[in-house]
Amino acid sequence: METVVIALGGNAFLQKGQKGTVEEQWNNVVRAMKQIADIIECGYRVVLTHGNGPQVGNILVWMESAKERIPPLTMDIAGAMTQGWLGYMIQQALRNELRRRGLNKVVVSIVNQVLVDKNDPAFQNPTKYVGPYYTEEEAKKIAKEKGWTMKPDPRGGWRRVVPSPDPKDNLEIDAIRALVEAGFIVVASGGGGIPVINEDGEIKGVEAVIDKDLAGEILASKLGADYFIILTDVEGAMINFGKPNQKMLRKITVSEAEKYYKEGHFKPGSMGPKVLACIRFIKHGGKKAAIGHLYRALDTLEEKTGTIIVPD
């Protein structure tokens, strides 16, 4: 049985223009899990991972709003909270959908730590905007009080920025592998995993955000998965994006993908990490990586749509 690791984008939980009510989130997850069930029904062994940006953002706003009554928590704990929150929704929605199709499978979520290098240059140059918006005066006061790095957000106001270090290892990979081999559908590395460092043999959480697609590649490669599929809100990757000669990439080799990546065709905050994750997966022995639309998941896996990256 072939194994596919599927990285779900934020649109699996929150669509553009929505407020993020519980009802909206459930409707989105239920719809997304129909797509995943299609793949499972075709006989693939599936492992899921997901983003958590809006949800961590909500938690940080809640903590800031209640800081006079409840001591704020750290970002690694906020990440762990979202793994439970979103994992629960995926577990329930997918299990119900599989039952409707006569498939008796159990879905489980792992509270999953992902190792980063404490000497990663990202720690010296935080770039990931998180949490609420502040005035410049408020931001400078908070930076002095808490030691946070605050920067003006291009979207307006000032916000906290945190590092986004490169993932190096998945600490619960042996448990995940055992569950997958036992027939469970596993949700792991949620939100890129809880970021931790190794300090003299001790594991310690850090205030950072790991890209979920790069962490998903670590998960897929360490599991020895056959396929790695990134599902998002666009059909695939484009070169010359926004220009008259923009072109959708369909099926390309890893060398071609690497060439386009080095030429700067993919933005760092959006398609860049997705393409890089696919390149790494193929270089680590994967058979096929793909980027496609969430609501065409099986079609992407079967190469009917999306950007497909294969070995040379």
Image (tube, helix red, strand yellow):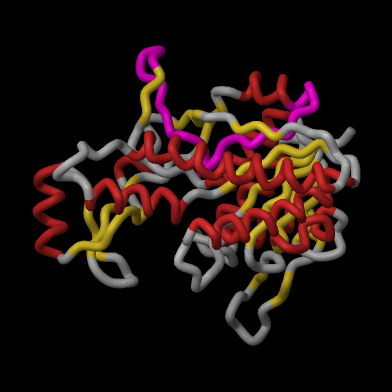
- Total tally of numbered discs in the picture: 0
Along the viewing direction, whichever of 239 and 191 lies nearer the viewer: 191
Direction top: furthest residue: 201
Q: Can you say whether 180 is above or below 306 in the image?
A: above
Residue lying at 60% horizontally and 35% vertically, measured from the top left: 188
Observer-nearest residue: 197 or 261?
197
Farthest residue, direction bottom: 244
Q: Which residues are magenta?
A: 180-202
Residue 310 image offset from top left, x and y in percent: 80, 50
Residue 188 position (above or below residue 86): above
Q: Position of residue 230 (x, y in %)?
A: 68, 52
Which residue corresponds to the image point at 48% horizontal and 40% vertical from the top-left?
Answer: 166
| Residue 134 visible within the image | yes
Tell me if residue 199 is in the magenta stretch: yes
> Which corner quadrant holds the N terminus?
top right
In the visual, does 242 lie left or right of 138?
right
Location of residue 158 by image quarter: bottom left
Q: From the viewer's perspective, is residue 63 above or below residue 198?
A: below
Q: Position of residue 63 (x, y in %)?
A: 27, 46
Residue 68: say if magenta.
no
Q: Residue at x 24, y 59 (%)?
A: 151
Q: Is residue 2 left or right of residue 128?
A: right
Q: Tell me the residue at 72%/20% (across/down).
A: 178
The reply to whether residue 312 is visible in this rendering is no
Q: Pick the residue in front: 213 or 281.
A: 213
Q: Residue 40: image x %, image y %?
A: 83, 43
